[in-house]
Amino acid sequence: MLNFSIVQATNVSLVYTIDSYRPVAGELVVTQLGFKSAFGFLLSFYTNPWVQKSGYISAYGAMAGISGGLLILFLPFYFFGHAVRAKTWTWRPIRMFVHWDDDREVGE
């Protein structure tokens, strides 16, 4: 279940961000995959000591709970996604660093 949720979270978030922020999709994909790689490394690096200290049931139960909690966040994005995207697109750091694409062709 833990592996399934990690893989699905990556796939769902990639599709969502590519669809939502198409002009800067390449940068978002690189950022998300970099974060996923760092998270995967840290998870594998600290899993053995965690299991040794807490036991299999406790450690993997906590990991599954964290993954499930993150996956359930799709509900607010499903209902309020458009408002969130519209609001974040106007944030000052986004305007400064992301709106450089205003003259970029997206093929649409």
Image: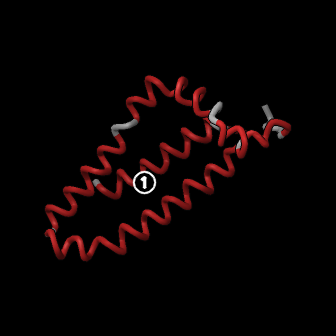
Q: Nearer the viewer, residue 97 or 14?
A: 97
Can you give x and y, in whole percent of width and height, for residue 14 in the image? 55, 46
Colouring used for the render:
secondary structure
* Residue drawn 65% across the image and 42% down it: 93
Can you give x and y, in whole percent of width and height, for residue 99 in the image? 74, 39
For this view, does 9 lie left or right of residue 90? left
Q: Nearer the viewer, residue 4 or 20?
A: 20
* Residue drawn 40% across the image and 29% down it: 76
User: Most extreme residue toward the front, as rendered?
Assistant: 92
According to the picture, the residue beneath numbered tag 1 turns out to be 7
* Residue drawn 14% across the image and 69% down it: 55
Tell me the SS state at disc 1.
Answer: helix
**Number of numbered discs visible in the structure rendering:** 1
For this view, does 1 lie left or right of residue 54? right
What amino acid is labelled 1 in the image?
Answer: Val
* Residue drawn 30% across the image and 56% down it: 2
Residue 73 versus residue 11 in the image, above or below: above
Residue 19 versus residue 11 in the image, above or below: above
Q: Nearer the viewer, residue 13 or 76?
A: 76
For this view, does 106 lie left or right of residue 32? right
Residue 76 versus residue 15 in the image, above or below: above
For this view, does 56 lie left or right of residue 25? left
Can you give x and y, in whole percent of width and height, for residue 13 in the image? 50, 44
Query: Are there few (<14), some (14-19), or many (20+) residues within 10 Å of tag 1?
Result: few
Can you give x and y, in whole percent of width and height, for residue 10 in the image? 47, 51
Give the position of the C terminus as an image quadrant: top right
Quadrant of the image occupied by residue 86: top right
